[in-house]
Amino acid sequence: MTTALLQVSDITAGYRPDLPILHGVSVSVSEAEMVTIIGPNGAGKSTLVKAIAGLVPISSGTVSVAGSNVTNLLTHKLATASIAYVPQTANVFTTLTIDENLKLGASTLSKAEGARRIAMAYDNFPVLQKYRSHKAKVLSGGQRQTLAVARALLTEPRLLMLDEPSAGLSPLMVSEVFERLKSLVSTGVAILMVEQNVKAALAISDRTYVLAEGRNRIDGPSSELAGDSQVATIYLGAGGRKR
Amino acid sequence: MLQALADGILTGSIIALGAIGLTLTMGILRFANFAHAELITWGAYMALGVLAITGVFAGPIGPFSFGLPLILATLVAAVLTAALALVVDYLVFRPLRSHTNHMTVVFSSFGVSLLVRMVILLIFGGSAEYYSDELQIAVRLMPGLRVMPDHLFTLGLTLVIVIALHFFLQRTRLGLSMRALAENPDLVRINGIDTRTVVRWTWIIGAALAAVAGVLYGMTVQLRPEIGFQLLLPLFAAAILGGVGNVFGAVVGGLIVGLAESFSVLFIPAGYKMAVPFIILLAVLYVRPSGLFGGMRGGAK
């Protein structure tokens, strides 16, 4: 394995310091690699990506991107750290137009460069072009996901983090979104993705981490985990604690 | 009737200027800032202070009661009011926002409002003051309608400010960030924008507009330390009527409140006129709970 692009080492994190949600979690993602995080409800999957994005405070452990320390990053400096993040819900501004959503995503770029990349985004995602002056609230769940990803890619990140991109989408849309993410990886972008859909996650990604109760449980190449009975046990074992 | 219409629009446009700042800070910071009205008083008195210190009472321009000195004093007052808003946010609201619950911040704004009023009382005294003792001749626009030139100026300036603000919010990056911040602060940060900067500009704009509203009030009515206290409820009525966070709504809300007050005097004793905007407010909220033009709500830190 090459040197990691993202290295999360032994982090403890939670909204309140006395109530940690993650207890010493470690994750790494290499250049142009697709890594998924799976685990039962309450495992801390979303908290992990939020902690990397600086939205949940980290009380111990470190996060580094390409060798530089970005632990407890100020969220507005994500783009500077070459990271883009697509939250699970509320990932577009519904009161703003599609065009305005993209303009906000380009706010760290110069106006000219922003305009150039937004034009490219419209070429890549024709559906956005079609609705560009409409408020984003008219978009369907899948279209919002598209807008959110298009927005995230404007800063040309080296790492894209997505929180359950398949949530609430029809099966057809899910495979479309996953295909698009796969082709992104082939262009050299690394992806760290939280997924509820275990089968799909294992089928699409290079490596998978299984979290439970805020701790690392199993990790390895997705193709190996797909046949691992332990993965199912973790889900069943935590079944009674579903929140 | 016509006179009541003119008076209502005048009061309404001053309320509107104050309500714009209130609706912006309320939409973005998600708390009811009861000290906002005090920024109006502060702005009005700062302009008076600048006039007194510089001692210039250069002659009025044309038919108006004021001249260049008051315009310059207003600019200085706007800066001083923005400074007050930033200092209060830094010293009082910001620490409370991150550590306590919502109601604590609201009550602290009551405290701030009393404090600001007392400071003004201490410095300037409690009696009524005027920017100028020039006598103005009312212009007869048509039968039954006499208007002071100052009143026309107030109306015109409000119109210019509202249009300028609209373009600012629609066309500039900062304006876009402000609208986005009212909907989802975390997503604004994820987009690479430092929300603290946006919050600071929100205070600056809201406070500057409050200062202008204060000077216009002082110019068309009189200066008293209770200006803010008297405008407090009309401001909230206007902001809520228009939908919290909605600038256009605040302007319409301000006009409705102003007109309701001035027309009510035709039908009921003047002492009750304060109640009329609230009857309208209750009636509107009964049908449209989020105000006339909906509203956006946020919660920036």
Image (cartoon, helix red, strand yellow):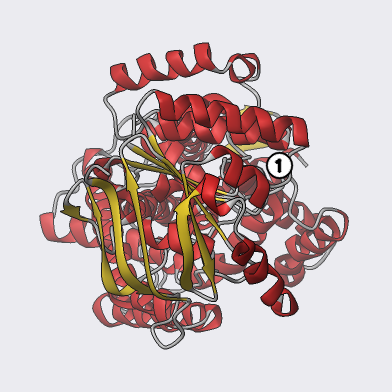
Residue A89 position in % (x across, y down) = 62, 50
Residue A73 placement, left or right of A133: left
Is residue B279 visible in this depiction of the protein? yes
Camera-nearest residue between A195 and B28: A195
- Taking the view exactly as shown, the residue that stands out farthest to the left is B54
- Name the subunit of mark 1: B
Lateral position of residue A69 relative to residue A47, left or right: left
Residue placed at 85% from the left, 59% from the top? Answer: B283
Relative side of B210 to B262, left or right: left
Camera-nearest residue between B258 and A141: A141
> Relative to A59, does residue B8 appear above or below in the rendering?
above
Three-letter residue code for mark 1: Leu
Residue A97 in view here: no
From what the image shows, is residue A228 above or below residue B180? below
Rendered view: A206 above or below A109: below
Task: Residue at the far bottom: name it.
Answer: A18
Residue at 49% x, 64% y: name it. A218
**In the image shown, does B131 or A154 lie closer to the viewer?**
A154
Q: Quadrant of residue B164?
A: top left
Q: Position of residue A116 (x, y in %)?
A: 36, 14
Q: Which residue is mark 1?
A: B5
**Mark 1 neighbour density, 10 Å: few (under 14) some (14–19) many (20 or more):** some
Quarter the N terminus of chain B occupies: top right
Residue drawn where x is 62% and y is 68% of the image: B233
